[in-house]
Structures are given as C-alpha cells and as structure tokens.
Amino acid sequence: MVLVMDNGLWQVLEFQHVKPGKGPAFVRTKLKNVTSGKIIDKTFNAGTKVETATVDRSDYQYLYNDGTDYIFMDTRTYEQVAVSPEIIGDAKNFLLENSTVMIAQHDGQVLYVELPASVVLEITHTEPGLQGDRATGGTKPATLETGAEIQVPLFLNVGDKVKVDTRDGSYLSRVN
C-alpha cells in the first residue's frame, strides 16, 4: 500500500496492530519514501484517516539495459517503459532478460520494481569444493549469471542452477 503524507508518497513496508491492555489501539509502521528511499518509523492512532495513493501495478517483461536505463515491456499492451537504475536498486542483481516483474506506477511515474520472491540463476564462477566437504558444512562465494555474488554451500559447482531469495540475496536451494 502507498500512502500520501507530508507532500510525498510512502510505501508501507511493515505494520503491526498493537492493542495494549490500557489505552487505545494503535498501528506501528515502517514506511519508505518512494522517491528518496528514506525509511522512517511512524505510529498511527486508532481511527486516524490516511490518504492512499492510486498505484497501478502491472506485469512487465525485462527486455534489456540500454546503458543508462532498464527497458521493460508491458505484457498486455506491449508498451515499453524505461526505468532508471536508482529505482531498480539492488533488484538489478537478480534481473535476467525476459524475466517478469511487477512495476508500480503513480500518474505515469514509476515508483518501484517488485521482483518475484525467488529466481533461478546459474552459477558462472566459484572455487571448487574441497575433498571432505559436506552438504551441512560451510559456504563459499559464488558469482551468478547476473554478476551478483552470493554465499552458497560448498558442494555447488560452476553450471549448477540455484534458487535465490530476491529480498535478501540468500541461497535457498539447488535446482535440477
């Protein structure tokens, strides 16, 4: 949800409804300014009216990077939209050509790009595991096909496909 507050747009990252034993209920939130990226904590009392922004969310297909912007195509209208690297942020580490993402727009302006919860990527470089390494052992750095570097278990090798959590960049599992 995106709120209109303090002459800006704020995306709700987390919220918690609190009902103490004494006193009125309130909602504790963590908000992110969609233009500057600033994150704040704000508490709303029960019954507070907030204005919500009209945000259009659509599925887009990532086409290519033209050197400055990332080009996406609306899968329904075939309309293309350019998104700046500042809006993409760390999502660029998990973007593959032809992958589908959700783009949120407000009045024609791109607010943010939302990746699927996990993506499958191929390991392009990693040191070989040593003899005696076990599946429950430690981890080693691995470079993925997008250029991102993550920590993976020692038994994985170059060419293996792995499922990666796009929210924090952590290894989830190997994909056969």
Image: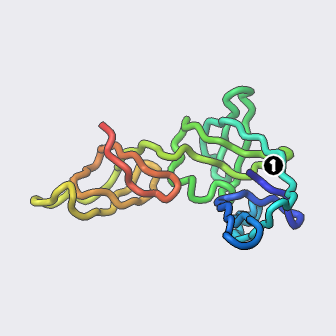
Check disc 1 and report its element: helix, strand or loop: strand
**Residue drawn at 74 percent across, 27 percent down:** 77
Could you tell me the amino acid type at mark 1? Gln
**Residue drawn at 39 percent across, 59 percent down:** 150
Q: Residue 165 in the image: x percent, y percent?
A: 46, 51
**In the rendered image, is residue 132 in sight?**
yes
Q: Residue 81 in the image: x percent, y percent?
A: 73, 41
**Crowding at label 1, few (<14), some or many (≥20) Cα neighbours within 10 Å?**
few
Farthest residue, direction left? 132
Check the picture and name the quadrant holding the C terminus.
top left
Which of 114 and 83 lies nearest the eye of the viewer? 114
Which of 79 and 27 lies nearest the eye of the viewer? 27
**In the rendered image, is residue 63 in sight?**
no
Q: Residue 43 in the image: x percent, y percent?
A: 75, 69
Judge from the rendering whether residue 140 lies leftward or rightward of residue 15; answer left or right: left
**Residue drawn at 39 percent across, 46 percent down:** 163
Q: Name the residue beneath numbered marker 1.
A: 109
Counting the numbered discs, the total is: 1
